[in-house]
Image (tube, coloured by chain):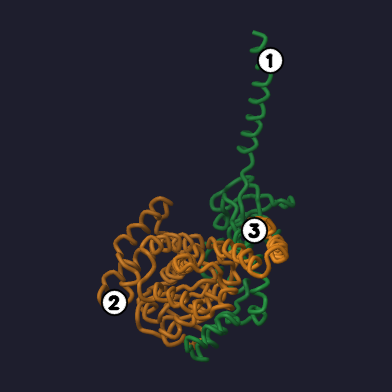
Amino acid sequence: MQSNRAKKIVIACVTLALAGGWSGCAEIQQVAETVAYSAGGERAAKIVHGGGTFVSGLLPIGYEEEQSIGAAIALQVLARYGGVSDQPALTRYVNLVGRAVAMTCDRPDITYHFAVLNHDSINAFAAPAGYVFVTRGLLKHIRNEAELAAVLGHEIAHVSQKHILTVIQRSKQLAGVTEAGLAYANHNPEAFKGLIDAAVKKLLDEGLDQDKEIEADTLGDVFAARVGYDPTAYVTLLTRLRTLKGDDKAFFKTHPDFSARIGAVQEVIQAQGWKPTGVLLGDRFARMGGRL
Amino acid sequence: MGRRQRQVPSLIITLLIGLSLFTGLALAETVFVQGKTAKLRSGKTSLDTVVADLKFGDALEILRKEGNWLEVQTESGIKGWLFANKITTTKPAGGSDDTLAKLGKSLRRSEASDVTASAGARGLDKVAEGYANSAGITKQHQDTVDRMAAYQIPDQEVEDFLKSGGLGEYAK
């Protein structure tokens, strides 16, 4: 009888902990754990704790955790591409263009950080929490500031739409990981490393899904157009890059099917009724181009 | 017959309420600041004086529209002109933490607090630093992420950059 009663109390506490987990009330969860401990001992308290943690693990990754994840992925980008440009004027210029675009993006209330990778390949990357990289190789193919703004807009859109975080959240669920971010890293750094490494593989080797790339293209062009840059500049750049196909296999592996991407951007331009009358700023970009 | 008569006043009341709601919506369109910041000016040019600095998510009522400029009123009653590239018709969710993420953070806070204690202006907190060490990332790359995170450009300098390029509200 006493055992049945204890079981009922523990079940009630698990339910309470799940409710606490879902409602975000840590105090409810603590009360449930305390009651379960007095009724069924340490094992019962652990079951109740597990229930609450499971629910919390299903909740989205918060900004604090995103910063840890973003920094870890940024480290891998640097390790793969060998470091960033040490030219202060170039770094400042790319940050000014990037921050101008970020100020009118759909997630302007976080800080974005931009850097030029000292690498001749043609590529650009974004890590969560606003770490954005563009290679020196890609900058060499850009002709004006409007094209650069659209490229940075594309990367900003990956951050604003939390594309990489979605990949991590999915990996976590597939791996049956119920704890998230910092708490998880604290308990199991090796497993956290596994999640980051999987995200890096997706970002740098396999590339994000095509629909995410197209979403970043169209949103990025919208962000750049909001600042006043010519929205058709991005179409010009993508068309120019398409002709390079084969020169840089990594880029075309991670950013496939340029025709679909160009078509999607053109559709947005048409739907918005935009004319090719925005600002290009070829001269201002050319002054920086000499530093590449 | 008597039942139908009783229904008439309630029908009229419903229609009146519906009409008043519709009229209210038609007269006042509420929009929200989409940019990180936005300047509310006394006139519809970038040369007019700034009457208020608006923040991301601030609600505004549109009074009229002329070209790329909107005359708006803030919730505190300040009227002015705003360049139209920084507004949205739907309330922005907020990027740093949405509601569900805040719930998760609240649940995890006791376990997270000890690992974030060193997080400040640095790009790498203890978690990322631990990852760097386990993944064999050099100190040089760790310093680079720290420098990226610490790199500051004041908003006013971005504003000056827009001005010199004829961008945004400074379009020529």
Residue B130 visible at all = yes
Q: Along the line of sight, which residue is nearer the eye, B74 or B107?
A: B107
Q: Is residue A18 above or below residue A286?
A: above
Q: Disc 2 versus disc 1: distance between alpha carbons? A: 77 Å
Amino acid type for the residue under numbered disc 2: Lys
Assess disc 3: are there few (<14), some (14-19) or many (≥20) residues with their C-alpha within 10 Å of its C-alpha: some
Image disc number at residue A249: 2
Q: Secondary structure at mark 3?
A: helix
Element carrying mark 2: helix
In three-dimensional space, the C-alpha distance between marks 3 and 2, rounded to whole angstroms, equals: 60 Å
Query: Which of the chains bears the disc numbered 2?
Result: A
Examine the rendered structure and indicate whether residue A273 appears above or below residue B39.
above
SS type, badge 1: helix
Q: Are marks 3 and 1 in contact (CB under 8 Å)?
A: no
Question: x, y (%) of residue A96?
Answer: 53, 74
Mark linked to residue B6: 1
Residue A33 is tagged as none
Question: What amino acid is labelled 3 in the image?
Answer: Lys
Rendered image quadrant of residue A65: bottom right
Position of residue A257 in the picture relative to residue B115 (left or right): left
Q: Chain of mark 3?
A: A
Residue at which label 3 appears? A7
* Residue A9, x across and y down, in percent: 68, 57
**Residue depth check, mark 2 versus mark 1: number of the one nearer the observer:** 1
Quadrant of the image occupied by residue A57: bottom right
Q: Quadrant of the C terminus of chain A?
A: bottom left
> What is the spatial separation of the Cα atoms under label 3 and label 1, in whole angstroms?
58 Å
Q: Quadrant of the N terminus of chain A?
A: bottom right
Q: In the figure, B34 relative to A72: above or below?
A: above
